[in-house]
Image (cartoon, helix red, strand yellow):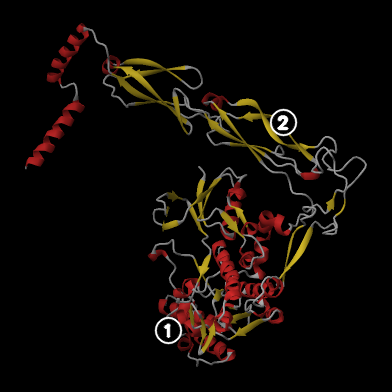
Amino acid sequence: MAKEVLVVGAGFGGLEAARALARDPGVRVTVVDQRNHHLFQPLLYQVATAGLNPADIAVPIRAQFSRAPNAEVRLGRVASVDLGRKRISLEDGTELGWDFLVLAGGAQHSYFGHPEWEEFAPGLKTLEQATEIRRRLLSAFESAEHEQDPAAQRRLLTFVIVGGGPTGVELAGAIADISRTVLVRDFRKIDPASARVLLLEAGPRILPAFAEELSRRAAEDLRELGVEVRTGSAVTGIDALGVTIGGERIEAKSIFWAAGVEASTGVLHEDERRKPMLPHRPVVELLGVPRGASAEELKKAYRKLAMLHHPDRNPCDKAAEAKFKELSEAYEILKDDQKRAAYDRFGHAAFENGGGTGAGGFGFANAGGFADIFDEMFGDFVGGRGGQGQGRGSDLRYNLEITLEEAFKGKQTSVRVPTLTACEICHGSGAQAGSKPVSCATCKGHGRVRAQQGFFTIERTCPSCQGAGRVIEKPCRSCAGQGRVRKEKTLSVNIPPGVEDGTRIRLAGEGEVGMRGAAAGDLYIFLSLAPHRLFQRDGANIHCKVPIPMATAALGGSIEVPSIDGGRAKVTVPAGTQSGHQFRLRAKGMSVLRAQTRGDMYVHAVIETPMNLTKRQQELLKEFEREGEAAKTSPESEGFFSRMKEFFEDLRE
């Protein structure tokens, strides 16, 4: 029996896990996500600064599993996870079970113990947040255009980005760039190039997770764009009118948060969540060093205490083991400049629930882990590694209704599908006879062009040749240079025995032909079963309601019932059979797909009450009723009326 794997979250981690598991036919994968799209978060800043549209960095989750019959996608938000029962509950009340659970809820923004800041400083983790930042950003320039008060205008044209990680760096650079290059020509009363952009980082340098040389170069590039880069600037307050850094006040209407993230653990019960790792004693007290101790002093103090409390030197001593863990965690904070700055600023709140994981956004050093996913889903946008060329044709869907008998026996049939096929005049090249495509002047034959956004460069499919690297000067008149024409084609489809409602049959290469000789897509036949006049299907089993005469049910006998294979089956009816009784006929049900076995057939007895009785029949039934009162031939009725009598007696008491 296939193992059920439930993956919560369709970010990079959840999606890659689900795709890998779905390759195993012995596994059934269900992916649950609160949105129906997978998002490429590293380019969210491009959406936030109007460089890209949301659709450019989002792809449907279902599209990633269109060829995985053992994978299912559920749209929903997880309300709770019950690890004991192995069940999750969605907000709509649906419950899903699992054999194995993958929680890949990703990260959410951490405001280090100040959730009230989120209202004034939105983060950048979702498309909704990106479009909200874009709205605030562009609205600030619009409002400044008509603002008469110079102080209010300066506040509107001041943009503060909190956090010097990749997201903060990207966002600050993009805002400065569009202010000086894109928007500068669009306003008459203000000069967008005069906008003030500040990047605030609590640690000693921006991009602290990267090499110092990269941090230095990034800071220089930002300053060339006009960004004020401030390190060692811990924000202590945020409100609707600006930010506070210690004793300094910066008036700003637009504040964007990129300073911290935490794991999305809200779906777990409180007692199942990971406990905060850090002790609530001051870390400098644990190591016995002064607050301003040097790196060498920290290392020396840690080594001395770690040797004293190491578990190897204190076997079976739980207190020593806990002390060693506390010391290690304290040293991890104090030896890292960024973590130490966060601790000095927010205390232990900076590290609870994942808050100490560093700046928000995307770390360039981790890019290789999901490069293949990125190419597969966003290859048309940035150009995949597979070289240039037109994209394959579109996949097609064809709905086909079959009978229950055809699903049982299987069927060879044909379908007529309207589609795009290769042009017979130019043989799919798109060019007139005697001519040939030439190198595209826009991309110089590369099929991709580069665009500068701030100090970052992105690559996208050439809009002139659609990635082919060549253009046609003399297009074929029959297909207008497309290399394909619309027509109907007849295809043979083999429907195997045992298919179910919703079964999908793939015909590889029978979808639409791609442009100018590119590969064709696939055709997917989706099967639906027509209602049957006798049988109801339940997986491999079938059910049939059969009327049984009252006399046969009372006295016993036998009846014949039809079976799905066209035969007849004899059913022995024991005396006293009641309506609703089930008779099981083994191996008389449906065929099982790709197997030699069959399901069972269940016959449901429906005792038929006689109608249009003759006078003699009525007399016989009345005589039967009189005889039955003494013989107690109706135990169900007697039991019911006895319980009813007790019910009314209880009410009177």
**Residue 162 visible from this viewpoint:** no
Residue drawn where x is 70% and y is 75% of the image: 180
- Mark 2, Cα crowd under 10 Å, few <14 / some 14-19 / many 20+, is few
**Which secondary structure, mark 1?**
loop
Q: Which of label 1 and label 2 is nearer to you?
A: 2
Nearest the viewer among 507 and 383 is: 383
Residue drawn where x is 21% and y is 28% of the image: 636
How far across and how far down the image is residue 341, in percent? 54, 84
Mark linked to residue 489 = 2
Placement of 324 over or under 574, stated as above or below: below
Mark linked to residue 562 = none
Q: Earlier in the sequence, mark 1 or mark 2?
A: 1
How far across and how far down the image is residue 235, in percent? 52, 82
Nearest the viewer among 438 and 214 is: 438
Residue extending furthest toward the left: 653
Residue drawn where x is 45% and y is 56% of the image: 78
Mark linked to residue 281 = 1
The amino acid type, in three-letter code, at marker 2 is Lys
How far across and how far down the image is residue 555, in percent? 26, 15
Nearest the viewer among 131 and 605 is: 131
The quadrant holding residue 376 is: bottom right
